[in-house]
Image: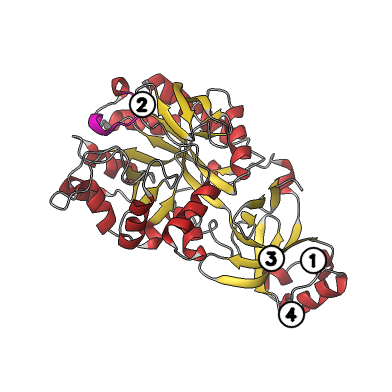
């Protein structure tokens, strides 16, 4: 499959295209496969040129810079750049902080007052900037169940807007959640606009997205769903299971057909029972499929998150927010795909009282995951970085290693976001 425009910055993106050299010095760096103490990360032209463990922690004076380059300057990518360019690069001191890959969000309906289905193209730019405040460097704006013309317009608008995002997090494509969902597990998705799986309708959605559709959520038990899963996978779209009343056997059939991801585990799904494990049992027990989890303490109890961590391979767990425009905002009324949602004490509910997305951000999701489960920082970070990158089949994101994109976040020791980089350029910096 040829490179989609959503996976690269356009030539007109301005500052992102400039030659830029940066060295980030951090108290620790999680790649996230391993942890480096006193790390130096060399960034050139938007990519990571090298990573090393510093022998000493010091102010980056010119003598310190020269000594460090003598130690590491022969590395392949670092050595391709003139030594003086590195000496005079932008050296960023974060000895008291932690550097990690930028977070990757596979499921966001909005944030910061912006809705992914808003027909105004500037809404996607607003989402991109708002996401960067919370350490997110790449994302899939999510389109939900709505009247067909509304879905088509949203897909087309997002496809157009992606070519012009030059600030904030990078859109990697589109996540379509619906309309082929179970009526009895629809959650906030409007029942009047649910559809039975249809190859022709899916093809229309795919064409409206102009090839930017990356993840597609549906219920596997519906008639025609298995053929649709096979078709989506054949087009390079990742079929995801969700909003489903599937039995264990029906969910397994969906996985056999090619489903490789699942959305908001436990929510809008047939509940697990020891005699009827259902779709939850299939997701927990099958290593071919990854599982999103919303760690806001509203969608899922912390003990359920502990059970997930104990039952599922950690590299198959993906932190997701399912955020709406209320994320990062105060309580009050908001919109989700044109639908009214009211936020009270952080919980987002529609007029029927149903949960309607979340007000969660990825940095808080990460802190909650670590606090509730006690898993290592490296494993926790992987759920927001490496694991979602693997779901999308991306080798250049979610990692700190030579050749990867310089999508990075500097975190405090309390795991608060201090600074966010996309392709080596600062897109958010916490005020002093």
Secondary structure state at the residue bearing disc 4? helix
Residue 43 sits in quarter: bottom right
Upstream in sequence: badge 2 or badge 3:
3
Judged from this view, the residue extending furthest toward the left is 275
Secondary structure state at the residue bearing disc 1? helix
> How far across and how far down the image is residue 176, in percent?
40, 35
Q: Which mark is residue 26?
A: 3
**Does residue 58 sit above or below 426 in this rendering?**
below
**Does residue 28 sit above or below 396 in this rendering?**
below
Q: Which mark is residue 353?
A: 2
The answer to whether one can see residue 269 in this image is yes
**Does residue 204 sit above or below 85 in this rendering?**
above
- Say left or right for 338 vs 9: left
* Distance (Cα) linking label 1 and label 2: 57 Å
> How far across and how far down the image is residue 149, in percent?
41, 19
Upstream in sequence: badge 1 or badge 2:
1
Name the foreground residue: 428 vs 299. 299
Q: Which mark is residue 86?
A: 1
Q: Which mark is residue 231?
A: none
Upstream in sequence: badge 1 or badge 4:
4
> How far across and how far down the image is residue 186, in percent?
30, 31
The answer to whether one can see residue 422 in this image is no
- Closest to the camera, between mark 2 and mark 3, is 2
Q: Which residues are magenta?
A: 182-190
> How far across and how far down the image is residue 203, in percent?
35, 32
* Distance (Cα) linking label 2 and label 4: 61 Å
């Amino acid at each position: 499959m040829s490179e989609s425009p959503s996976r690269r910055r356009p030539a007109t993106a301005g500052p992102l295209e400039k030659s830029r050299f940066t060295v980030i010095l951090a108290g620790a760096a999680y790649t996230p496969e391993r942890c480096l103490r006193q790390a130096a990360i060399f960034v050139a032209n938007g990519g990571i040129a090298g990573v090393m463990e510093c022998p000493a922690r010091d102010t980056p004076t010119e003598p310190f810079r020269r000594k460090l380059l003598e130690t590491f300057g022969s590395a392949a990518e670092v050595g391709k750049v003139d030594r003086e360019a590195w000496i005079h690069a932008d050296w960023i001191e974060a000895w008291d902080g932690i550097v990690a890959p930028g977070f990757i969000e596979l499921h966001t309906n909005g944030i910061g007052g912006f809705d992914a289905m808003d027909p105004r193209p500037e809404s996607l730019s607003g989402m991109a900037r708002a996401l960067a405040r919370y350490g997110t460097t790449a994302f899939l704006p999510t389109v939900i169940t709505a009247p067909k013309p509304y879905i088509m317009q949203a897909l087309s608008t997002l496809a157009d807007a992606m070519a012009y995002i030059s600030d904030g997090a990078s859109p990697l494509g589109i996540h379509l959640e619906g309309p082929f969902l179970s009526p009895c597990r629809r959650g906030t998705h409007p029942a009047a606009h649910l559809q039975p799986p249809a190859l022709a309708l899916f093809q229309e959605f795919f064409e409206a997205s102009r090839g930017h559709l990356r993840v597609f959520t549906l219920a596997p038990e519906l008639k025609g769903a298995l053929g649709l899963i096979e078709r989506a996978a054949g087009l390079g779209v990742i079929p995801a299971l969700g909003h489903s009343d599937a039995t264990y056997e029906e969910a397994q059939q969906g996985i056999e057909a090619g489903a490789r991801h699942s959305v908001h585990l436990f929510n809008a799904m047939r509940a697990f029972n020891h005699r009827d494990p259902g779709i939850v049992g299939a997701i927990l027990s099958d290593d071919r499929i990854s599982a999103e989890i919303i760690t806001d303490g509203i969608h899922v109890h912390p003990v359920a998150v502990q059970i997930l961590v104990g039952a599922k391979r950690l590299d198959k767990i993906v932190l997701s927010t399912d955020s709406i425009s209320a994320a990062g905002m105060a309580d009050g009324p908001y919109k989700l795909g044109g639908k009214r949602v009211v936020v009270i004490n952080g919980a987002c509910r529609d007029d029927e009282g149903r949960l309607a997305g979340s007000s969660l951000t990825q940095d808080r999701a990460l802190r909650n995951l670590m606090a509730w489960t006690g898993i290592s920082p490296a494993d926790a970070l992987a759920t927001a970085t490496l694991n979602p990158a693997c779901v999308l089949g991306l080798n250049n994101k979610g990692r700190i290693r030579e050749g990867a994109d310089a999508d990075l976040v500097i975190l405090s020791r309390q795991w608060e976001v201090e600074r966010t980089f996309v392709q080596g350029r600062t897109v958010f910096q916490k005020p002093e």
